[in-house]
Image (tube, rainbow, N blue to C red):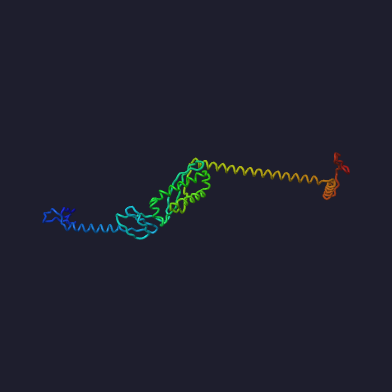
Amino acid sequence: MTEKYSLEDILKLFGWEKSERSGGGNMDKGAFGRFGIVFIVFAVVFFGMMAFFVVSPGEVAIKTRMGKVVDSYEEGVHFKMPVFEAITKFSIQIQRADIKTEAFSRDLQTMKAELVVNHRIQKTTVVSIFRNLGPNYVDRVVDPAVQEIFKSIASNYSAEKIIAERNAIVQEVNMVAKERLTKNEIIVTDISLVNLDFTDQFLKAVEDKQIAEQQAKMSEKLVVKAKRDAEQVIAKAQGEAEALRMQKASITKELVDLRKVDAQLKAIEKWNGVMPTYIGGNGVPFIPLGGTR
């Protein structure tokens, strides 16, 4: 069963009792005294916690007092005046900035690029960067500078060359960006081109051109092969003709007579000793020898 509390019970819970002598018109002064002590202790603890700040490894803190830079602090626990002093922290480790931009090639092809800029600042220049650039130095300096550099370099190359020589163009962007941002006390360690997109129409045109170039190269190879085969056939025919000419030039009357003697000798070697029954030749009718039986 839920218990019900009266207003008097609630006041007793917090130490605020009605004074019987005053007829319940005033709170007990002791209760207000105790509340005041609790409030003071709470305020001391709260402001005591606000009076210290921690700088983690890889960070540098800038202390300002009423808007004026007081000092910079490295890692550790440090003191500050609550309300009057403020702390701004900077990382001196390598930071990553993702930058998206749109540019045009020399032949006016549109491209969308995504770059990753790895950079850092030095603790000796944090105060200067805070004064001149502010905490948002990436948005104010790094991003627009890299976009401008990429657009300027891309406009010097045709779209096809940008695709073919992507690494060389990235190296050029790195060189120019490092030199420019160093003047702003920002150290660029590396810039990478993680994505590069052209319009679908341009990519289709590039693909068609590559296919046509491949077909042209294949046709050229076939023409060269056919030409080489024809030259081989001609060379072979010329060789055979030269051989026949040489053979014809070497034939003499003595060689013909010698060939006839060789033929007769081979015929004698093949004779089986039986006399022919008929003789004739050179238009003379065959005449039987020895009569008929």
In the picture shown, does residue 166 fall above or below 124? above
Q: Where on the picture, by quarter, is residue 64? A: bottom left
In the picture shown, does residue 204 fall above or below 127? above
Residue 160 percent coordinates (x, y): 53, 44
The residue located at (36%, 60%) in the rendering is: 76
Residue 214 percent coordinates (x, y): 57, 44
In depth, the one of 274 and 261 nearer the eye is: 261
Residue 273 percent coordinates (x, y): 85, 49
Is residue 61 left or right of 208 when viewed as pictured?
left
Spot the residue most to the bottom: 76
Residue 44 percent coordinates (x, y): 26, 58
Is residue 63 left or right of 278 when viewed as pictured?
left
Is residue 90 left or right of 229 when viewed as pictured?
left
The residue located at (32%, 53%) in the rendering is: 66
In depth, the one of 261 and 180 nearer the eye is: 180
Is residue 218 left or right of 139 when viewed as pictured?
right
In depth, the one of 98 and 213 nearer the eye is: 98
In depth, the one of 33 and 73 nearer the eye is: 73
Q: How many marks?
A: 0
